[in-house]
Amino acid sequence: MSTPAKCHRCGGSGQFPYVSMGQMIHGVCFRCGGSGTDPHDRYHTPEEREKLDRRNEKAAARREAKRLTELEGNQQQAKELYPEAVAVLEQVYQENEAALGRNDLPSFLTSVAYRYFETGQLTEAQAEGVVKSYQVHLERREQRRRWDEEKAQAEPVPTGSKVTVEGVVVKSEWKETPYGSKAVMTVKSDEGWLVYGSVPTGLWEQLETDVLDDDGQVIGATTRRPKGCRVRFTASVAASDRDPHFGFYKRPRKVELLEGTETPA
């Protein structure tokens, strides 16, 4: 037969000391009501513990069987409704397990994949997002592969105080500095090397275009983004310490916006 356990709040004394008005008061323990025995905990004999363990094991087995039945039904329903998404999740799960989580898979895909294999649940919005996200992931992976191939074939970046840089602006953005915001860009040359630096003032002037009204009258001006433009300028270039194909330019001059420049989207 199980025996009551000592109250862990008062230690079995039935009283709980506390300070009131600067005096130590020994009041009644609210957990055990002064009895000293815990109303929620019990000591069990070895026979009782063995019986409880068997009962718990059977209950756990029933819960697991129920979970597996529900999982199989949910997965079967998901395969019928969203076969493409389920195929993607299976591929993501296998790839992530093989790589022990050390890969370039988006966290959204891995989280949905593991939830699917744990519960079998997959909503319509998740299925659409999985297919789109995986397609974007494959495109980016292919793009990175092409970049790695181009980088392996690229020539080292030239250095000096009068380097002529000619190529396409592959990236442009605004960057916050301790002195305020400034526009920066990355230019990729025809030889494959890259340089990074501030957007020249002269380039902004050449990127300005007039805004016309319905009658053809100039009512203002707008400036296109440098990304996608083909440019040529002279600058001081220093190579990166970590990558011989990447450099930093400063003091750009003789800036030209070359023909064949496409209007960035």
Image (cartoon, rainbow, N blue to C red):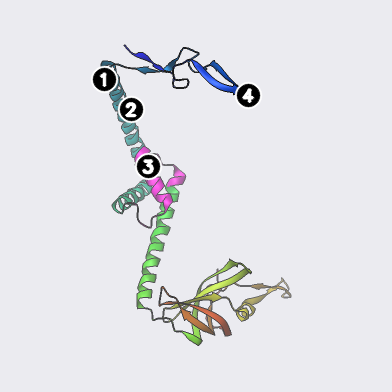
Which residue, given by chain and number where applicable, does mark 1 sit on? 50
Q: Earlier in the sequence, mark 4 or mark 1?
A: 4
Which residue, given by chain and number where applicable, does mark 3 sit on? 116
Q: Secondary structure at mark 2?
A: helix
- Three-letter amino acid code at disc 4? Gly
Find residue 63 and name its label: 2
Q: Earlier in the sequence, mark 2 or mark 3?
A: 2
Q: Mark 2, residues whose alpha carbon is within 10 Å: few (<14), some, or many (≥20)?
A: few
Comparing labels 2 and 1, the label whose residue is closer to the camera: 1
Q: Looking at the figure, which quarter contains the C terminus?
A: bottom right
Separation of residues labelled 2 and 1 (CA atoms): 20 Å
Comparing labels 4 and 1, the label whose residue is closer to the camera: 4
Q: Secondary structure at mark 3?
A: helix
- Three-letter amino acid code at disc 1? Glu
Separation of residues labelled 2 and 4 (CA atoms): 54 Å
Residue 226: where, in percent of width, then height? 56, 74
Q: Residue furthest front?
A: 23
- Residue 246's place in the image compared with 102, above or below, is below
Q: In the depicted view, which residue is nearer to us: 147 or 138?
A: 147
118 in magenta:
yes
- Three-letter amino acid code at disc 3? Tyr
Comparing labels 3 and 1, the label whose residue is closer to the camera: 1
- Residue 67's place in the image compared with 33, above or below, is below
Separation of residues labelled 4 and 1 (CA atoms): 50 Å
Q: Name which residue lies at 26% across and 18% down.
A: 46
Which residue, given by chain and number where applicable, does mark 4 sit on? 22
